[in-house]
Amino acid sequence: MNNIDEMSVNAIRVLSADAIQKANSGHPGLPLGAAPMAYELWANHMKFNPANPDWVDRDRFILSGGHGSMLLYSLLHLFGIGNLSLDDIKNFRQFGSLTAGHPEYGHTVGVEATTGPLGQGMAMAVGMAMAEAHLASVFNKDDYKVVDHYTYVLGGDGCMMEGISSECFSLAGTLGLNKLIVFYDSNNISIEGSTDIAFTEDVVTRFKAFGFQTLEVEDGTDLKAIGKAIEEAKADTTRPTLIKVNTLIGFGCPAKQGKASAHGEPLGVDNVAALKENINWPSKEDFFVPEEVYDNYKKIGEEKAKAEEEWNKLFADYCAKYPEMKELWDKYFNGADLSELFDSEEYWAKGEKAEATRATSGSILNLIKTKMPNLIGGSADLAPSNKTNMKDAGDFSKENYAGSNLHFGVREQAMAAIGNGLALHGGLKAFVATFFVFSDYVKPMARLTSLMKLPLTFVFTHDSIGVGEDGPTHEPIEQLAAFRSMPGISVFRPADRTETAAAWMHAVSSTNEPTALVLTRQNLPQLAGSSKEALKGGYVLEDSTKETPDAIIIASGSEVSLAVEAKASLAADGIDVRVVSMPSMDVFDAQSDEYKESVLPKAVRNRVAVEALSDFGWYKYVGLDGEVVSMKGFGASGPAKTLFEHFGFTTENVVNTVKKVVNR
Amino acid sequence: MNNIDEMSVNAIRVLSADAIQKANSGHPGLPLGAAPMAYELWANHMKFNPANPDWVDRDRFILSGGHGSMLLYSLLHLFGIGNLSLDDIKNFRQFGSLTAGHPEYGHTVGVEATTGPLGQGMAMAVGMAMAEAHLASVFNKDDYKVVDHYTYVLGGDGCMMEGISSECFSLAGTLGLNKLIVFYDSNNISIEGSTDIAFTEDVVTRFKAFGFQTLEVEDGTDLKAIGKAIEEAKADTTRPTLIKVNTLIGFGCPAKQGKASAHGEPLGVDNVAALKENINWPSKEDFFVPEEVYDNYKKIGEEKAKAEEEWNKLFADYCAKYPEMKELWDKYFNGADLSELFDSEEYWAKGEKAEATRATSGSILNLIKTKMPNLIGGSADLAPSNKTNMKDAGDFSKENYAGSNLHFGVREQAMAAIGNGLALHGGLKAFVATFFVFSDYVKPMARLTSLMKLPLTFVFTHDSIGVGEDGPTHEPIEQLAAFRSMPGISVFRPADRTETAAAWMHAVSSTNEPTALVLTRQNLPQLAGSSKEALKGGYVLEDSTKETPDAIIIASGSEVSLAVEAKASLAADGIDVRVVSMPSMDVFDAQSDEYKESVLPKAVRNRVAVEALSDFGWYKYVGLDGEVVSMKGFGASGPAKTLFEHFGFTTENVVNTVKKVVNR
């Protein structure tokens, strides 16, 4: 490579090594080995404008191997994206700095996705490529390709070992996502040593099996070969492409390169010096970058800016020529106005007959879709059970990217991360669905949804032993606690149609956090006392006639009707209770102290919670003097009605539990 | 096929169709399509003794597609295994019956593993094959192959779509597990319809990439072809084998076969009749099985019994010739006696210097290994961080199955399910390890560990914001709540060496439930007050001088020392508090009411809990009048010390919180 390119590549290595050394923490292996492919891609192939990192039609780049964050920070600094300064680089991994240990979306400008848990970046990239394909097919006209960009993702052996990468790439191959280009940084090293001990598979052949074009770059420092591979990847208009790039982990550091020790710890002061000497770096000074290197990046960046200028012209003409498309575009990218729908009687219509909340959810979802054209989503092969199919919205497929119904296959992990990718891309409102018990598979990805503050909606049906005959492997017990305990997500378990409408309104109105909807398989009665108050998370559904109730029964979802029955029965015995419906603990906790006190007065210590799942978390509301009617262990296989009786979810048991509390 | 074989195959189909119809619930698609491969395998190739399903050297069979449970129940009934009666079959999916919706290990004799969550059975089979390889290599002598059996697993498209199957089979290929034979029931149908919509990958090529021998049976009803494939699979002594068997879902039912509707709902009375007519079944009567079919299964079973007789002779000679091996065998299969170790001063020695509990765990693990030769386990590529390497125990590899240190690669899901397989096989005491934040990936499998009551140990290190610079993607917050809320598992978060020793003692002493050890990355001081009482889950670590303390501070792990410091500081202000260490909520909850009252007297309502994770679940102990010093959101990237201060884990904040509670 010519000298300025070589120096520009080495600048990434030097900044990475220096920052990690100064922080005395970090992962130099990836940045040193992958610097050439990253530089070649960003400098000579990727479409972006350093001055406007938010440009809608930019190419996306995700560093799936998030531990190599200094690779990304170095590029952002050198290209002058988001004014990431040299001081920011010097503060790598320090509290409050813009250069966190792993790239954090929303924290550092230019970071397209939060990465770190290996493999998830791969699946988020698939989601972004699906978003691009969908939006292109909705908005592009023969003479105006207003949506036309690539998604690049870079990861290593760890990302390839994680099951989610097989899930997402098997789907990407099926969908023929040709704008997706995957860089596999292959260095044959993992933390425990050579990949020979656990990973001798032929990754290229695996990707062939998925339906990818597969290319290999023998020498990961050969910019020409890397560039040629990228061009070949773009030339394939029917398949996604894997580019396997053979690299040397910790390249350039004589004592460390090719060794596991290069992966996750600073090189050491002497080794950083040796690296600089070995690559003929002009100065031993920390964080030294020659002016000509900055100039080179600046020159490249200025060239790139023109692409956005041209797009802006193109888009202006497009809007002038297709005003109806401009209108649609605004609905997609600025959000549709749903206020009319949410003010309508139709939306809040009381349910007439007993219905499973999953079924109610399905009809409300379809109602919302009529006003929210960019609503897109699907299930991990359970749509008929999750009731998530959107009528007349089409099926997203290789033949029809315009379809809004996604078919993820039996791949809960990839589904959730793809949902994150759809939300990250912009222009779409996404949801994903599966059985609640399988939310366990979704959890690692949902955690990133919350961390990134993405308004993704999780539709979880079959929410208790109400599952019945399928038995304990399919009956959630602790899943509600798992999601309620996660920061930054709203969890709703509605009791009837009204509360399900409130839950969906909360979900699609959210702009900065995900929502999980937890829905029943079995029919539930429509409750006279249910109301929009459900939007507050918890509210008095049926009150006591006394100012200070004899007791309070708190319940959610399918158990609220049980609480209502118990109240009636207790009244006959002269015990006057209040029934509180608690569809969402987190939303209730966020209300004012006054409101919370008005619903759950501290003075009333006779409290019983009823929920057909784990009691974990409920004592926050019933305290040391209360009781929780809940599942004490796993469920069982049998008809749902039998199970509810067997496990004590009967009016009688709720009544007796309240009496026990009142009388002690 | 000859008539009796054909009728024996059809008996499986008829029993399945009738049972599912009577239950009006279940999945006929798999049993009808896979009956021939299952019959050919069980009747003509699999080694087992119907009269003794527990025979140690039997071949293992796992139905990974657990929804097809009637396939397995039909075989168990027809072979007379565990006396599963026709009445049991008639009670399919009824509460309390032996024929639960999905196969449940420990509930139904002959079920080798609980299955249902797709893909997990595949990985458990890999674990069983690893156990066989390890035990064979430890115990076999040239002239005595006392451990010599195959592991067969059967699953469909769903199992192949799940990421865990790529994780476990990539590892199986690396390890060259030639005694593992995988049946892929390929019918191109999933719940949402044809697999074309989400799964067009070439599965056979994927398995080639993993290093498997791959075979294909064109016609899934051709017993000869299936038998030939099984023989070829056994003939390959260096690679595991995939046998792709092309089947018709719902085979034999004219109106349903080949359709998604055959998968998960009863065929319908008329279709069951049509099935019987279509396959020329001799009677329309429900649950009718001709005597000659029972006789055929009986004859086959009696032949198979001889294999165990021969093995018993072989094993008796082996024990006579190698008494030292017999002694070792008993340690493996009956459990080593650790009482001496657990009574020793060495085991309970107080820690001398501040140490991370992960490091303490590593030394205790090595101490236990010296007395427990069948202790086996490893990490998902984090052994150097998890401190789980066992010195001089060897690395398990294709070249050395005798090694006890397992290298799972970056595959948390497969690791956990393989751990289940190791535990299910018998003869081994297993543990698996990763970062605590990645317990999210382990959770779906750990749930089956608990459900199956397997004494597997989970080693989770880096248990809080103490992770530091790696930031929020690597800092657990809600993971402790997720595991504490799961039924049937003990979760320990020890505070120092003494409590870590107690936690490990609990873990390896358990025979019927898993244990999770939650350990720090950072050093912790050794506590004067810590003791064996930790085995009770919660205990008074430092008491108040008053009979009724002014307040109680409850803490776990790294926060206990903070509570001790706060107590000293509060004493200076005349507030006399008790410090309770709570390493395990579930173990504490299992103590007598008297003991619990003695540790946490109901009369003392001034309670503060301190834990650097979510407060979810803590109000059970602090009630409505208490406070929890905890994480209110996600962590951040920065030095651990800075983070603990920033998020309020300081003596000062604990002191102020106690004062606030005392003074209100």
Image (cartoon, coloured by chain):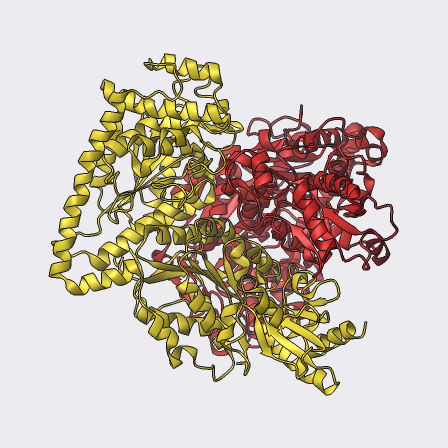
Chain colours: A yellow, B red
Q: Residue furthest right?
A: B547
Looking at the image, residue B466 sits to the left or right of residue A81; the answer is right
Q: How many marks?
A: 0
Residue A619, horizontal then vertical, whole percent: 68, 62
Q: Quadrant of residue A36?
A: top left
Q: Residue furthest front?
A: B573
Q: Residue furthest bottom?
A: A572
Residue in the image at 52% along x and 57% along y: A438
Looking at the image, residue A651 sits to the left or right of residue B335; the answer is left
Q: Quadrant of residue B508?
A: top right
Residue A490, horizontal then vertical, whole percent: 50, 60
Front residue of A638/B410: it is B410
In the picture, which quadrant includes the C terminus of chain B? bottom right
Front residue of B471/A170: it is B471
Q: Is residue A387 among the parts visible in the rendering?
A: no
Front residue of A206/B531: it is B531
Looking at the image, residue A376 sits to the left or right of residue B526; the answer is left
Residue in the image at 73% along x and 26% along y: B353
Q: Is residue A369 among the parts visible in the rendering?
A: yes
Front residue of B515/B512: it is B515
Residue in the image at 24% along x and 48% along y: A57
Residue B388, horizontal then vertical, whole percent: 64, 32
Residue B291, horizontal then vertical, whole percent: 63, 67
Q: Considering only vertical position in the picture, is B391 above or below A596?
A: above
